[in-house]
Image: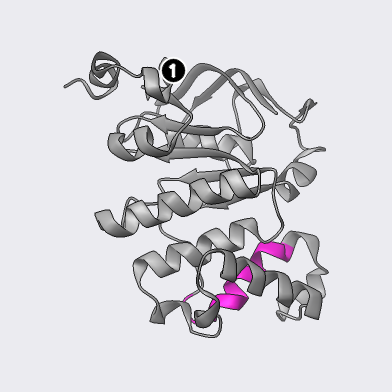
């Protein structure tokens, strides 16, 4: 489904975020990228959906190279979950979810949050999937951190993407909420057959929910193994324990 070929990215100042990353992701897979802060995880994820411009290398999605021409179509087929939720605080949960359709709606109607009944029903269905239907008309700033992230997930899945990108989705949550969010993403992965690429710091959550784990350090893949086969020495390599 996704193939990354020799991806490189250097930021102003000379920081090498990605140093020749090669990666293949199968349809329906739950892939986790582990690595310390500054390892290139976020840059890699944002390169896939065009939020970060790559320096060199190629990315193929559904056998089509991602470029300026194909990117809008790729973005329609991908959803993203952000570490800081990325919600509009003074909007209701349902309107935050509906912003996930902005790229596929008329710009005029989107500007004034004028969505069709069908679109609103899709938003309610997405909120029901994440267990927040009863909070549909609560403002985002009235919700707990875990609830806010569930709204973020509902926004990401409203258009039923083929690929879900989750960038540190539980970094700001307590352990109980973090486990709930990860179990929800896993449920979406299995029940809706949505491929997931998830950035994490938490080794225990990666082991529990992933099919496969990539170890990233200083912009390079250090290991690529199925979760049951991960050894302690592999983890020690990327975190330098």
Residue 10 shown in magenta: no
Closer-to-camera residue (233/73)? 233
Residue 116 falls left or right of residue 99:
right
Q: Which residues are magenta?
A: 89-102
Q: Residue furthest bottom?
A: 137
Q: Position of residue 114 (x, y in %)?
A: 76, 81
Q: Main secondary structure of the magenta part?
A: helix
Q: Position of residue 115 (x, y in %)?
A: 76, 78
Q: Name the residue tied to disc 1.
A: 225
Q: Residue 88 at x, y = what percent?
A: 51, 73
Q: Secondary structure at mark 1?
A: strand
Is residue 97 rendered magenta in the image? yes
Q: Is residue 116 visible?
A: no
Query: Quarter of the image containing the N terminus?
Result: top right
Q: Nearer the viewer, residue 10 or 20?
A: 20
Give the percent coordinates (x, y) of residue 20.
52, 15
């Amino acid at each position: 489904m996704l193939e990354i070929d020799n991806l490189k990215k250097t930021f102003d100042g000379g920081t090498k975020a990605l140093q020749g990353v090669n990666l293949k992701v199968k349809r329906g897979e739950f892939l986790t990228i582990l690595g310390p802060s500054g390892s290139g995880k976020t840059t890699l994820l944002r390169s896939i959906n065009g939020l970060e411009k790559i320096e060199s290398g190629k990315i193929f999605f559904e056998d089509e190279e991602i470029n300026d021409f194909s990117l809008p179509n790729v973005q329609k087929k991908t959803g993203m979950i952000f570490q800081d939720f990325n919600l509009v605080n003074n909007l209701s949960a349902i309107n935050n979810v509906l912003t996930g359709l902005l790229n596929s709606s008329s710009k005029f109607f989107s500007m004034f949050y004028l969505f069709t009944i069908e679109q609103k029903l899709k938003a309610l269905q997405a909120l029901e999937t994440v267990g927040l239907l009863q909070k549909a008309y609560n403002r985002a700033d009235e919700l707990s951190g875990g609830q806010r992230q569930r709204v973020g997930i509902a926004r990401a899945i409203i258009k039923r993407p083929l690929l879900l990108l989750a960038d540190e989705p539980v970094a700001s949550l307590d352990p109980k909420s973090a486990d709930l969010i990860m179990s929800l993403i896993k449920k979406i992965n299995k029940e809706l057959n949505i491929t997931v690429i998830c950035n994490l710091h938490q080794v225990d959550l990666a082991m529990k929910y992933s099919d496969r784990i990539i170890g990233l350090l200083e912009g390079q893949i250090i290991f690529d193994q199925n979760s049951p086969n991960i050894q302690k020495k592999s983890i020690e390599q990327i975190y330098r324990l």
